[in-house]
Image (cartoon, grey):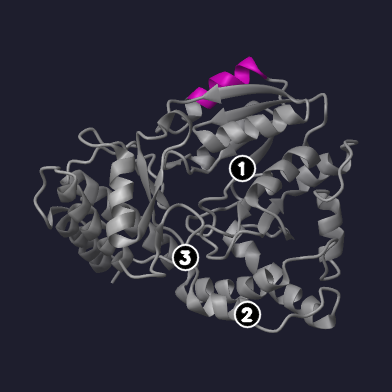
Amino acid sequence: MLQDHSILRIPGPTPIPPSVNQAMSQAMVGHRSEAFKHLLSRVAPRLKPIFGTNQDVLILTSSGTSALEAAVVNAVKEDDEVLVLVTGSFGDRFVKICEAYGIKVHRYDTTWGNAVQPEELKEVLQQHPQVSAVFATYCETSTGVLNPIEDLSKVIKQESDALFIVDGVSCVGAVEAQMDDWEIDILVTGSQKAFMLPTGLSFVGVSPRAWEAIENNPRPRFYLDLRKYQSQLEQNATPFTPGVSLIFGLEKVLDLLEAEGLDQVYRRHQTMKNMTRAACQALGLPLLTDDKAASPTVTAIKPETFAADDLRNVMRQSFSITLAGGQNHMKGHIFRIGHMGYCSPLDVLQCISALECALVELGDDITLGQGVAAAQEVYIHDLQNTR
């Protein structure tokens, strides 16, 4: 194993492109300088197509979780009731944030590995017609589930007046998001996933309807007051000290995404998902989610013939490849392969090849090359269909 050789195949933080690292290394500028104002004026409008919105996308110097908290503290009053759709650990985090602010929470849990179905949501909303907001996770990182956000939004708008607030931290930038057309009221993501940056920035899209709720909310707030970010963004500024180097990097990330084209970015992630799942199926590795609910950014595997953490240890020790483990009650029972952001089909083939070697080392009865071949067939098929 080479020193300083590390390959991240986890669902965040993800690898950073060399050109982005270089952009973040340029000389510092003052965050109240004209140079920074010009930088922000160039960067902020380019976030809108990724969110699928005509509204401003706010940039916070904070983690994705703080942006989730900002959504709660800005949009929900203290005496409101909300519904949280929990499909894994990060849906549960929404519950904990709401409860920390004294909000009455109605939670709807699915079995981990399952997405929320629109007909289920309709029934739950009919039981709780008084909720002021519905919270959902677009990609549930802990299970590899992609919830059908567009369909869920339709049900919410038909059955209630609730705001729809969505955690898109582990998928926005890698999957399609149409905030305006899907009538999402607040959409949140972070910098360390599909945006190919270090942790430290979060992004928040807010609908006109959500702004009305925010303006009429008497709840105290300070650093996470979205009104401050909106008013300052109109002047190409931030209310507090921003992560200037990260925003230099963000500009380069946007260059890369635009050069590839968002449609192609989304196709690449679909291909990597299909390659990973085909390889696992060929190797007899049980997948936690079905094909319909599977996320293009992370795949969860629940092995039956060996311990998940033993596999992760072999991958790290033998190949310097880091895979993610399980969370909460899934800890030790699953491993997760991240394939998002600065990741290509070649990276997936590398990971699957190493995975096969690790399985042999653990004594699993497989035929070497079987998983790689299955992934190759998916890649060739997808390549031919895009020409």
Q: Nearer the viewer, residue 254 or 316?
A: 316
Question: Label 2 vs label 3: CA separation?
Answer: 16 Å
Q: Earlier in the sequence, mark 2 or mark 1?
A: 2
- Can residue 64 be seen in the rendering of this structure? yes
Q: Residue at x 71, y 27 (%)?
A: 99
Q: Give the residue type at disc 2.
A: Ser
Amino acid of disc 3: Pro
Q: Nearer the viewer, residue 29 or 124?
A: 29
Q: Position of residue 368 (x, y in %)?
A: 11, 55
Q: Is 134 situated above or below 252?
A: above
Give the x, y percent position of residue 25: 62, 80
**Lower position in the chain sequence, tag 2 or tag 3:** 3
Residue 285 percent coordinates (x, y) = 22, 41
Name the quarter where the C terminus is drawn: bottom left
Q: Earlier in the sequence, mark 1 or mark 3?
A: 3
What is the span of residues highlighted in magenta in the rendered image? Answer: 120-128
Residue 58 sits above or below residue 237 on the image: above
Please tell me whether mark 3 sits on a helix, a strand or a loop: loop
| Mark number displayed over residue 15 | 3
Number of callouts in the render?
Answer: 3
Q: Residue furthest top?
A: 127
The residue labelled by disc 2 is 25
In the image, which is nearer the foreground, mark 2 or mark 1? 2
Q: Residue at x 61, y 29 (%)?
A: 84
Q: How many residues crowd around disc 1 within 10 Å: few (fewer than 14), some, or many (20 or more)?
A: many
Give the label, 1 or 3, closer to the camera: 3
Query: Residue 317's image quarter?
Result: bottom left
Residue for badge 1: 166
Give the SS element for disc 1: strand
The answer for how far apart the CA atoms under marks 2 and 1 are is 33 Å
